[in-house]
Image: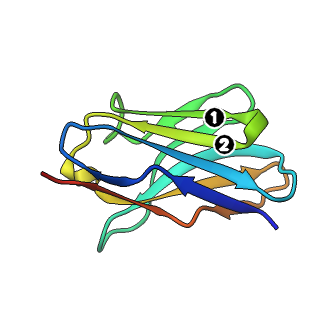
């Protein structure tokens, strides 16, 4: 049984920073790609950032480029999202996602990020 456990969400003022973490536990995984998605109330879930396990190639949504940084620790099956210069429009539930080499998908339980003064 594979579980993704997220941490690091919370309430922060505009301009502040947060760091999200997501670690996989359970069966040994061979990860192809790790990513972060978010879903704001009344909106569809959207891709925020993703990183390829082999080589570290990254992708960012235009709305977060230059402010967010995704990184990973392959040995620990962990992915991070450093979020700087946060804006109220970044408020959402953030979900981590792992795609394995066998094309299976795993999701975290979600962590709330609220940017408000």
Q: Identify the residue at horizontal 56%, vertical 55% (top origin).
A: 6
Q: Is residue 112 above or below residue 64?
A: below
Q: Residues within 10 Å of mark 1 (few under 14, many from 20)?
A: many
Q: Rounded to the nearest whole Å, what is the CA distance between mark 2 and mark 1? A: 6 Å
> Picture coordinates of residue 12 (x, y %)?
25, 48
Q: Identify the residue at horizontal 45%, vertical 49% (top origin).
A: 8
Q: Quadrant of residue 92?
A: bottom left
Q: Identify the residue at horizontal 32%, vertical 65% (top origin).
A: 40
Query: How many numbered marks does the figure carry?
Result: 2
Q: Identify the secondary structure beneath mark 1.
A: strand
Q: Which residue is mark 2?
A: 78
Q: Identify the residue at horizontal 75%, vertical 43% (top origin).
A: 32
Query: Left or right of 15: which side holds 93?
Result: right
The answer to whether mark 2 and mark 1 are in CB contact below 8 A is yes
Q: Is residue 89 above or below residue 66?
A: below
Foreground pick, 88 / 63: 88
> Picture coordinates of residue 53 (x, y %)?
71, 35
Q: Which mark is residue 20?
A: none
Quadrant for the N terminus, please.
bottom right
- Which residue is at the far left? 117
Query: Left or right of 107: which side holds 110?
Result: left
- Which residue is at the far bottom? 42
> Picture coordinates of residue 50 (x, y %)?
56, 42
Q: Which residue is mark 1?
A: 72
Foreground pick, 97 / 21: 21
């Amino acid at each position: 049984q594979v579980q993704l456990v997220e941490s690091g969400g919370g309430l922060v003022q505009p301009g502040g920073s947060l760091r999200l973490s997501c670690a996989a536990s359970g069966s040994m995984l061979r990860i192809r790609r790790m990513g972060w998605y978010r879903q704001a109330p009344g909106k569809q879930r959207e891709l925020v950032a993703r990183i390829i396990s082999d080589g570290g190639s990254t992708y960012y949504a235009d709305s977060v480029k230059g402010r967010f940084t995704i990184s990973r620790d392959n040995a620990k099956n962990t992915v991070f999202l450093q979020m700087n210069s946060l804006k109220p429009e970044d408020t959402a539930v953030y979900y981590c996602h792992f795609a394995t080499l066998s094309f299976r998908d795993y999701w975290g339980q979600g962590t709330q990020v609220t940017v408000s003064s």
